[in-house]
Amino acid sequence: MKRYTFNEVANHTSTKSCWVIYDKKVYDVTEFMMDHPGGDDLILDYAGKDVTAVMKDVMEHEHSEAAYDILADYCIGELDDNKQCFSSSVTVDKKQALHRQRMQLLEQLEESKTYGMADFHPKETDANADIKTHQFLDLRKALIPQFFTSSFTKEFYLEQVHKPRYLPTPAIFFGHPLLEPLSKTVWYVVPLLWLPFSAYQLYISSTYDMIPLTCFSFVLGILIWTLLEYLLHRFLFHVDDYLPDHQIAFLLHFTLHGFHHYLPMDRLRLVMPPTLGIVIAYPLINLGHFLFPPIMAYAVISGGVLGYVMYDCIHYYLHHAKVFEFHFKEMKKYHMAHHYKNYEDGYGITSKLWDVIFGTVLKYGPMTTNE
């Protein structure tokens, strides 16, 4: 048999020439595309790639013996034994298959079809039925202590924590009389606490009598926050694939952001509690003074804090309000799509700026609306 490299196969990705790899053999399936029961678009999604993991993925589609017999007719050679390329291909295909499996679970939810409604109100979860059906966390009890008495696999945890539930009242987080109140925050506490601080930092910068530099630094601070917002959301809050398979890792993931995907409409846990905010702000403020001269540092910090306030308030607004048409209507759909269509893209909350720059824009089709 003729031998082909992975790169040679990867060049055949069109309807005129479509090759795939299965079990280290190369197949030219160009003629079969129109006869494929799932349509030619599905084959094109994997054109030039290794489909071994995909064809064996039951969640994607379990192929019959007849399908493999048909595939054999289109074999044109073997894959060159380049182990590095093959291993890389298999890894990519497994990751893609896992991504599709996770997103298919979201598509089974009613909310995946209604999140675009202006008056989106998900149905309350039956806590009794939920624990019996899924055997995950009991919504009637304190959630955090349950991680110390449970044993989940990584994939089961990620599947369940991204499957939203809804309660009529705030969930019990710690269940401790001192810790529980610290985990709850009404949205307006954030601007009441941080806006005066932001204004004071800007005032100090203005006393240096270099207003143009103060204004520039203030805008720079806002921009820095938007980048920080994106990076934290993508690389800290959604570290799913790199999450260690350990209960403590699940607990930290749940505390940082998993809870928000698990109970996305909990009104008292949508903005950062002041105590946690102060702990996080302290080193960032010191970093600002380390990186910039005083006149710039105070203004950058002011802009960064204002950016954070806008982020937290907008996040709450997108979840719980019938938003203004300008900008916010689209951002509401965009963020809801992050929850109900694809939580592995669309990390921007206040805007799509950094998603566009880094190629993580979340794409979604037409949806039902009642606007």
Image (tube, grey):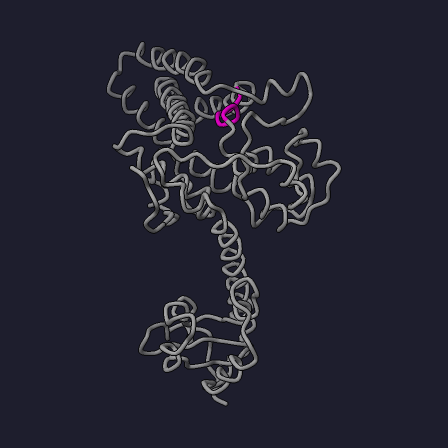
Q: Residue at x 45, y 85 (%)?
A: 74
Could you say which quadrant of the image residue 137 lies in? top right
Q: Residue at x 67, y 36 (%)?
A: 138
Could you say which quadrant of the image residue 200 lies in? top left
Left/right of residue 251 with respect to residue 203 in the rendered view: right
Spot occupied by residue 94 in the image (x, y as percentages of width and height): 54, 62
- Relative to 85, is 320 above or below? above
Could you say which quadrant of the image residue 52 lies in? bottom right
Question: Is 168 inside the magenta-drawn segment?
Answer: no
Q: Is residue 17 visible?
A: yes
Q: Is residue 8 visible?
A: no
Spot occupied by residue 262 in the image (x, y as percentages of width and height): 55, 38
- Relative to 255, is 135 above or below? below
In the depicted view, which residue is nearer to us: 240 or 258? 258
Furthest residue in direction bottom, as rendered: 1
Furthest residue in direction right, as rendered: 149
Question: Is 269 inside the magenta-drawn segment?
Answer: yes
Spot occupied by residue 170 in the image (x, y as percentages of width and height): 56, 25
In the depicted view, which residue is nearer to us: 330 or 78? 330
The residue range painted magenta reads 267-273
- Relative to 88, is 249 above or below? above
Spot occupied by residue 7 in the image (x, y as percentages of width and height): 43, 73
Identify the image quadrant of the C terminus: top left
Number of numbered discs = 0
Left/right of residue 235 with respect to residue 336 in the rendered view: right
